[in-house]
Image (cartoon, rainbow, N blue to C red):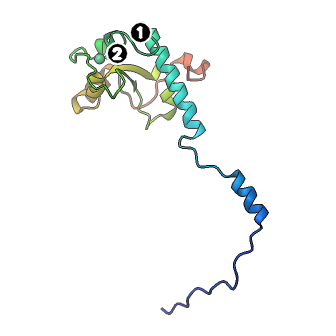
Amino acid sequence: MKRSPMPRRAQRLKTDPEKVRQWERRRKPIAQRSRKRAGEDRARAKLKRALLVASGLTADGAGPIERACAGVVLLPEIRCASPFGARPRLEMHEVVKRSRWRKGLTVRSNVVLLCQAHHDYTETAEGIARATEVGLLASAPHVHPFDKFEGGSC
Ligand SMILES: [Zn+2]
């Protein structure tokens, strides 16, 4: 098939220098985190502090991890440990994964604290089965009746 070349524009597009200046003044880079995402992160941090304090630790997580790790009771076959310094000693674990229920990230009844050893275990084949058995993993939100009144987040 014969194609004719795209015709050249006869002259440059007209630009209004004042409009360009206005645009230059207005422009700003795309946010690295959306406002929505930043709000979610703040709500998560707040929830984590609440969970830590409720377990008798300080809001920044100082204290024995065994006191706050939900694995102690639910998965006693694994011993608490948090050997990785680059990760938080206590991590937030979502019962219904974020890929299945985004809003669940900040729903208190959907989040528990786990030490690194217990958290990693819930990602192994054996651990997934066990975690599902004890209610640490679920495929759909089981919203506690009170969450409806609190708007689902704390
Ligand atoms: Zn643990």
Apparent side of residue 44 relative to residue 113 in the rendered image (left or right): right
The tally of labels here is: 2
Label 2 beta carbon less than 8 Å to ligand 1: yes
Q: Is residue 135 visible?
A: no
Amino acid carrying mark 2 in the image: Ala
Amino acid carrying mark 1 in the image: Leu
Q: Position of residue 137 (x, y in %)?
A: 35, 26
Q: Is residue 58 above or below residue 126?
A: above
Apparent side of residue 45 relative to residue 96 in the rendered image (left or right): right
Q: Position of residue 78 (x, y in %)?
A: 22, 18
Element at badge 1? loop
Badge 2 is on which residue?
A: 70
Apparent side of residue 103 relative to residue 94 in the rendered image (left or right): right
* Circle 1 crowding by C-alpha within 10 Å: few under 14, some 14–19, many from 20: some
Element at badge 2? loop
Badge 1 is on which residue?
A: 57
Q: Could you tell which of marks 1 and 2 lies nearer the N-terminus? A: 1
